[in-house]
Image (cartoon, rainbow, N blue to C red):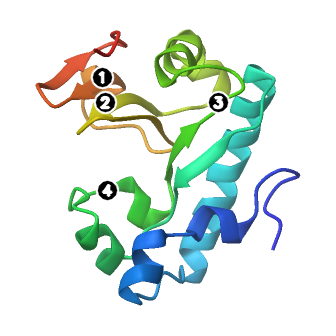
Amino acid sequence: MKLTPHFTLAELTRSTTAERLRLDNTPPADVIRALQTTAEMLERIRDTLGAPVIVTSGYRSPEVNRAVGGATSSDHMAGQAADILAPSFGTPYLIASTLAPLVSTLRIEQLILEGVKGKQWVHVSTRRPAKVINRIITITDAGARAGIHALA
């Protein structure tokens, strides 16, 4: 099922962890509506970057979220977040630093540059965090910092 011209429901619900552990990762109807909004945000990001966006993690059922060690309040479980890469555009740092000044224009409610356990990606969400300081952050093994910062 196509959600937008470049993003499908299958793409936003694919999980290698779910496949490996044989966990159901089928979203309920209300989450599919949220995934539509997330896909629309991803289209705006794709247009801005002028490059294809790869979703490495979208919707996660509560069981899948637990299996990957996700936060208990993860926006992924509500279909409101995606972890992305855009290799033909550049590094996750370049993606996040390009998007950061445009979050309001692109209707990205949270932007996180993540560099954890040797992996790097950009997390985007359609849900604004309760604390404004958490809207644009960088998370590394050393912790979280406001703003987008170069990763080691």
As shown in the figure, which amino acid type bears the numbered disc 2? Answer: Gly
Q: Which residue is situated farthest in the left direction here?
A: 142
- How many numbered callouts? 4
- Local packing at callout 4 (Cα closer than 10 Å; few below 14, some 14-19, many 20+) is some
> Which numbered dot is residue 138?
1
Location of mark 4 (residue): 74
* Residue bearing the label numbered 3: 87
Q: Quarter-wise, where is residue 46 in the image?
A: top right
Q: Which mark is residue 115?
A: 2
- In this view, the mark in front (1 or 2): 2
Q: Earlier in the sequence, mark 1 or mark 4?
A: 4
Q: Are marks 1 and 2 in contact (CB under 8 Å)?
A: yes
For image coordinates 78% across by 62% down, the residue present is 3
Label 2: how many Cα within 10 Å (few below 14, some 14–19, many 20+): many
For marks 2 and 4, the one nearer the N-term is 4
Task: Give amino acid for label 3.
Answer: Pro
